């Protein structure tokens, strides 16, 4: 193949890795292989998938899966290896020493993210964050290119080798068949949605508590719970009776949820990593014509308020979230205009097609001599 994409953490059909990057590279005429945890080798949408063993434990994943990914990537003979997980940094450096061109794809601000990891004892978070920052610094100086998912992430790496490829929606992918909002007024009249990882710092508790302040409202919720404790806590809350939990859904499932909703929620807590993030769910809501209720962060304010695409709230205040939801419910015409503004902003600015051009240009520069 011309390029091998590598992940030891993400599911094989991860939206950014597979549906966007791998498929875009394949559609450009390149031969593409993806090495990822999966049940078997397969070929989908022009991409060869090479499976590695799925492992649950973090230690076994780091010690075994990451090196299995590296060995299988090397065995493909691809001149360019593009890896997507911090735990693959040592493997990326080794592959560089073995003569491959290496692309380091940085999805998150890892040192900041470590501060939110509840499974890491608090006393260890600062030392681990410092070690991870050092590991990134070393890796950045060894690889050929760095792909940053947001501008703040890019600011942490050498400018001359860093390309910003943001995780914006694919145009038309999540739009309902009718092309308008809402598709089914009866089912979506007082329905909100949240799609993504479900955890405390992602606003799970506040979203369910907000339902306690609303009459006849329901929330369509989809995504994996980050911990069993969080799931147990929110299921025990009074507002859970108004939650329709769909579990982990595929892209068609996401589209159906958006088509059945009036407004999308993205009320992440003001953690350092989230304040400078650009969550894909926010742009996917906009792409489907949904108004957005989002945390009032400066970066998000620029996106949501400047486009007139929704409302900004204190993410730690369930009543403020509920009031914003009720405003959307009771101002149908204005909310519809917000949704259309957001959709237009995605069509003009925040879409994968524009980011794809930057990805392909970077790969043109990496052609073997």
Image: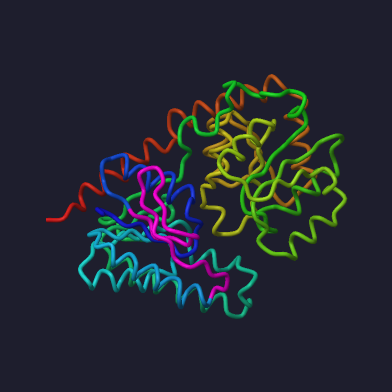
Q: Position of residue 281 (x, y in %)?
A: 57, 43
Return the residue nearer the eye: 82 or 130. Answer: 82
- The number of discs equals 0
In the figure, residue 23 lies in which quadrant? top left
Q: Position of residue 37 (x, y in %)?
A: 47, 62
Taking the view exactly as shown, the residue that stands out farthest to the left is 369
Q: Is residue 126 above or below residue 5?
A: below
Return the residue nearer the eye: 180 or 313. Answer: 180
Q: Write down the region rendered in magenta.
A: 33-58
Return the residue nearer the eye: 280 or 224. Answer: 224
Q: Position of residue 111 (x, y in %)?
A: 49, 67
Residue at 84 percent across and 38 percent down: it is: 214
Residue at 75 percent across and 30 percent down: it is: 327
Q: In the rendered structure, does residue 165 fall within the stretch colored magenta?
A: no
Q: Is residue 348 above or below residue 76?
A: above
Return the residue nearer the eye: 135 or 304. Answer: 135
Q: Is residue 261 left or right of residue 16?
A: right
Q: Is residue 115 above or below residue 362?
A: below
Q: Position of residue 320 (x, y in %)?
A: 76, 42
Quadrant of the drawing holding the C terminus: bottom left
Q: Is residue 210 left or right of residue 84?
A: right
Quadrant of the drawing holding the N terminus: bottom left
In the figure, residue 304 lies in which quadrant? top right
How was this image coloured?
rainbow
Residue at 69 percent across and 40 percent down: it is: 193
Q: Is residue 316 left or right of residue 340?
A: right
Residue at 74 percent across and 42 percent down: it is: 321
């Amino acid at each position: 193949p011309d390029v091998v994409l590598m992940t030891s953490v993400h599911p094989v059909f991860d939206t950014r890795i597979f549906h966007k990057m791998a498929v875009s590279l394949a559609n450009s005429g390149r031969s593409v292989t993806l090495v990822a945890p999966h049940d078997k080798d397969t070929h989908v949408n022009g991409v060869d998938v090479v499976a590695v063993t799925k492992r649950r434990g973090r230690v076994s994943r780091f010690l075994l899966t990451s090196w299995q990914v590296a060995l299988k990537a090397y065995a493909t003979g691809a001149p360019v290896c593009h890896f997507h997980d911090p735990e693959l940094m040592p493997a990326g450096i080794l592959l560089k020493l073995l003569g491959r061109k290496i692309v380091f794809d940085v999805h998150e601000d890892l040192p900041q993210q470590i501060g939110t990891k509840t499974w890491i004892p608090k006393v260890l978070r600062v030392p681990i964050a410092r070690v991870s920052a050092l590991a990134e610094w070393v890796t950045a100086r060894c690889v050929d290119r760095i792909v940053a998912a947001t501008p703040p992430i890019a600011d942490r790496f050498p400018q001359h080798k860093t390309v910003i490829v943001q995780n914006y929606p694919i145009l038309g992918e999540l739009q309902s068949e009718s092309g308008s909002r809402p598709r089914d007024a009866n089912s979506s009249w007082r329905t909100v949605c949240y799609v993504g990882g479900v955890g405390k710092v992602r606003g799970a508790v506040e979203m369910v508590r907000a339902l306690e302040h609303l009459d006849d409202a329901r929330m369509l919720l989809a995504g994996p719970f980050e911990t069993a404790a969080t799931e147990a806590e929110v299921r025990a809350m009074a507002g859970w009776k108004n939650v329709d939990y769909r579990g982990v859904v595929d892209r068609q499932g996401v589209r159906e949820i958006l088509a059945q909703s009036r407004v999308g929620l993205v009320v992440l807590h003001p953690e350092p990593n989230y304040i400078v993030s650009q969550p894909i769910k926010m742009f996917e809501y906009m792409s489907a014509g949904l108004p957005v209720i989002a945390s009032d962060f400066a970066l998000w304010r620029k996106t949501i308020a400047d486009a007139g695409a929704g409302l900004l709230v204190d993410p730690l205040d369930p009543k403020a979230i509920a009031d914003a939801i009720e405003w959307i419910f009771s101002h149908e015409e204005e909310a519809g205009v917000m949704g259309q503004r957001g959709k237009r902003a995605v069509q003009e600015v925040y879409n994968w097609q524009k980011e794809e051009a930057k990805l392909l240009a970077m790969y043109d520069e990496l052609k073997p001599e």
